[in-house]
């Protein structure tokens, strides 16, 4: 566990979330020979976009939110098995191999013009998630709800974020939010996948939802083979998908903005802001799946003694439904995506630790594949 810092005043927290900036940088040149990019899996969603939007009635979304706790337990069990296998291995090969890197800056929505250059603010250590104070103001609007159905036709939900990519219509999330990781490759991607940035419960009709920035239907998916074939929680539980702009909108980046990214730079990060739409939390009863929450604090290598497990670990009590939500720097660059928590034999969460897959070579391969395809 981490030793929390003294929390600063609420004003500092609001500034940390409401004024996440970015500066334009270039990718680092590798000093050693550049390793080959790992393989990725491509997929398509062929369902008519209007059919996807029509499918997601308030009742079906309610079922998706109800299923999120069960989903969290299943993911946590799978991740525990994978972690135990990593702990047991003695093979250190590859621990000093060169890493791929890629980065891009955060982009503000079109009405706010260009790339943010506001100075980054320090954030307090805040493992007890709070409601995002201005959820309909950039950069909070880049985060949204992901909805999908599985092979059995059951509804599910996750979180995700608009990310800077060619085509300006890309969402970043966890691999398990778009594919079960069961070895089926391109045939395994989920159906009726919808992204709703700035998603919220309707003030006029409780139990229904509002989509103040439109409903964006998934078009094409990219996930690492490390996930689609191997269900690798160390490096593979990440993915991206492109979306189609609904009527009246140009593209996702112009509409809500986009986080940048910084992939391949390790698992230790200070002052991270983690956000999502949790339906529950560790020892929490006030999360409903409709409200965007956030935590702040440092991220560390989950197993710094084991070079084969470079997952990101953060003290944050957000739970089911926050999967796929971004771990981002104060410069507005994604460095991780919420993946899993730890549970006991009764499927009850045992601490406030929240994990992400390492966003290294696999993440670089995915974002490069998205850019190449657009």
Image: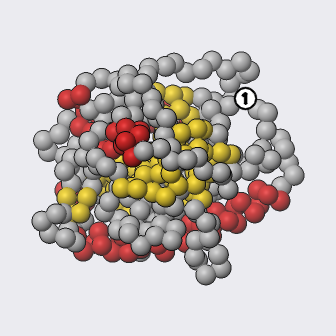
Q: Quadrant of the C terminus?
A: top left
Residue at image x 18%, y 63%?
A: 202
Q: In this rendering, would 291 be left or right of 341?
A: left
Which residue, as the protein is rendered here, is positioned at the far bottom? 346
Q: Can the viewer see residue 357 in this picture? A: no
Element under label 1? loop
Residue 181 in the image: x percent, y percent?
A: 56, 59
Residue that badge 1 annotates: 98
Q: Quadrant of residue 82?
A: bottom right
Q: Residue furthest right?
A: 90
Q: Nearer the viewer, residue 36 or 236?
A: 236
**Residue 239 placed where, x, y %?**
49, 47
- Find residue 123 and report its horizontal and vertical position in percent: 48, 40
Q: Residue at x 71, y 60 (%)?
A: 83
Answer whether residue 283 is visible to the viewer in this image: yes
Q: Is residue 109 above or below residue 155?
A: above
116 left or right, relative to 324? left
Where does residue 64 sit, x and y in percent of width and height? 35, 70
Q: Is residue 296 above or below residue 365?
A: below
Judge left or right: residue 238 versus residue 45. right
Asked if residue 28 is positioned above or below residue 182 in the image, the reply reads above
Of residues 334 and 85, the one drawn nearer to the viewer in this rendering: 334
Mark 1, other Cα within 10 Å: few <14 / some 14–19 / many ≥20: some
């Amino acid at each position: 566990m981490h030793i929390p810092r003294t929390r600063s005043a609420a004003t500092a927290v609001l500034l940390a979330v409401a004024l996440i900036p970015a500066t334009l940088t270039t990718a680092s040149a590798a000093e050693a020979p550049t390793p080959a990019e790992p393989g990725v899996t491509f997929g398509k969603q062929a369902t008519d976009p209007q059919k996807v939007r029509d499918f997601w009635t308030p009742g079906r979304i309610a079922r998706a939110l109800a299923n999120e706790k069960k989903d969290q337990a299943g993911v946590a069990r799978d991740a525990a098995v994978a972690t135990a296998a990593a702990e047991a291995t003695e093979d250190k090969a590859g621990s000093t191999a060169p890493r791929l890197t890629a980065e891009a800056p955060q982009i503000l929505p079109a009405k706010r013009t260009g790339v943010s250059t506001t100075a980054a603010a320090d954030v307090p250590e805040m493992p007890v998630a709070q409601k995002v104070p201005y959820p309909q103001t950039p950069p909070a609007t880049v985060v949204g709800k992901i909805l999908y159905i599985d092979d059995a036709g059951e509804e599910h939900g996750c979180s995700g974020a608009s990310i800077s990519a060619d085509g300006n219509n890309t969402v970043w999330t966890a691999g398990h939010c778009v594919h079960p990781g069961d070895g089926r490759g391109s045939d395994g991607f989920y159906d009726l996948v919808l992204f709703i940035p700035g998603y919220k419960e309707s003030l006029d009709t409780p139990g229904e939802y509002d989509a103040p920035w439109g409903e964006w239907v998934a078009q094409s998916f990219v996930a690492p083979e490390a996930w689609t074939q191997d269900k690798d929680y160390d490096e593979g539980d990440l993915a991206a998908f492109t979306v189609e702009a609904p009527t009246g909108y140009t593209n996702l980046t112009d509409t809500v903005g986009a986080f940048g990214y910084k992939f391949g730079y390790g698992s230790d990060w200070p002052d991270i802001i983690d956000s999502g739409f949790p339906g529950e939390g560790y020892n929490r009863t006030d999360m409903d799946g409709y409200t965007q929450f956030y935590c702040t604090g440092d991220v560390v290598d989950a197993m710094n003694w084991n070079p084969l497990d470079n997952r990101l670990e953060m003290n944050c009590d957000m739970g089911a439904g926050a999967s796929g939500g971004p771990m981002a720097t104060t410069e507005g660059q994604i460095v991780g995506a919420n993946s899993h928590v730890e549970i006991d034999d009764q499927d009850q969460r045992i601490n406030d630790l929240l994990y992400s897959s390492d966003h290294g070579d696999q993440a670089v391969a995915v974002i490069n594949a998205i850019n190449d395809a657009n």
